[in-house]
Amino acid sequence: MRHIKLGQSGPQVSCLGIGAMSFSDFYGATTEANSFAILDEAMAAGVTHIDTANVYGMGRSEGTIGDYLRARPEARDHFTIATKATITRDADGNRILRNDLEHLEAELDASLKRLGVEAVDLFYAHRRDKSRPIEETADALGALVKKGKAKAIGLSEIAPTTLARAHAVHPIAAVQSEYSLSTRSPELGLIQGCARVGATFVAFSPVGRSFLTDTPLSWDAVQGLSFLVSNPRFSPEAYPANIAATDAFRALAADMGTSAAALAIAWVLAQGDHMLPIPGTRSVDHFRQHIEGANLTLSESDLAAIDAVLPAGWAHGDRYSEEQWVGPERFC
């Protein structure tokens, strides 16, 4: 599997990572044994990067990774680990964002304990707290690097101008945002901004929350998932339209002798040498399709064929509801 550098001066990591939100029940029930099986498969296939966060299952995802590292100590040298903090609640239970050093350090300390490691390879501000300048956030994150609790820092769901301002204070190793054939807004400056400063672009939901797979989530399954049932792309109007729109993509993948998920991963990787997709899954078979995609090389004619069936702007519905948009920066 091809490797890339994580940030300007970080370690080499596989060009495919694991999105460990799926190690909680966010997209459906799972078990620690199931997550362990995916991590075993990753080690066997040479996938080396794990992305998690303190809020994924309220610590459950990090705890599962920590349990795996304790059960298989050799895995710590195999994997680079990224985690995040920012999203929390106030005394009244309202969702708020905090980028101050006190909060970030306390949350990182708790993450390190769950993970069972002395430092993480990458620590993100999960969302930008707009009540404070981004320069202060970068400085706070940088302080955690100086303390030896994180080896590098990143930002998630930010605008290109925010990246430039933060990077002027402390090197930003990675920027994470949703990016796939169905969500292409990062092409309007964020991917390019990462390339300019030497940051890795980490693409979450690279298979379009299942639309870009051979087995999209069924309508009934969506009804049981609180995030998706309120997401505009899974509304009663948009869901069937998005299924119909991606049927041609599934057919194209089959004609090319691969799975739709593999083709979607390969397309993301073809968008730049600094791309790192982090699909999540609860299925070892699906994870193998992601690995297949990381090992595919697409020709110009392949990319043209994909663009013909899924041109930019094909998706029905916004990627987030108004409530889900609280936190991510809109820049286009």
Image (spheres, rainbow, N blue to C red):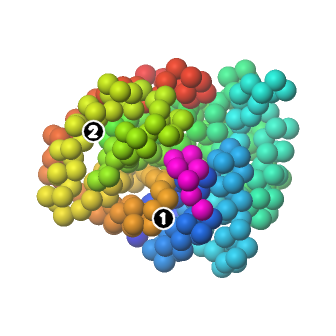
Between 159 and 54, the residue placed more toward the observer is 54
Q: Position of residue 200 (x, y in %)?
A: 51, 49
In which quadrant is the N terminus drawn? Answer: bottom left
Alpha-carbon distance for marks 1 and 2? 31 Å
Between 226 and 278, the residue placed more toward the observer is 226
Q: Position of residue 224 (x, y in %)?
A: 50, 40
Does residue 105 appear anywhere in the picture? yes
Q: Are there few (<14), some (14-19), or many (20+) residues within 10 Å of tag 2? A: some
The residue under label 1 is which amino acid type?
Ser
Q: Which residues are magenta?
A: 25-31
Is residue 129 shown left or right of residue 249? right
Q: Nearer the viewer, mark 1 or mark 2?
A: 2
Is 49 above or below relative to 27? Answer: below
Residue at image mark 1:
14
Q: Secondary structure at mark 1?
A: strand
Is residue 70 shown left or right of residue 15? right
Q: Position of residue 83 (x, y in %)?
A: 66, 51
Q: Are there few (<14), some (14-19), or many (20+) residues within 10 Å of tag 1? A: many
Residue at image mark 2:
243
Q: Position of residue 31 (x, y in %)?
A: 60, 62
In the image, residue 50 lies in the stretch drawn in magenta:
no
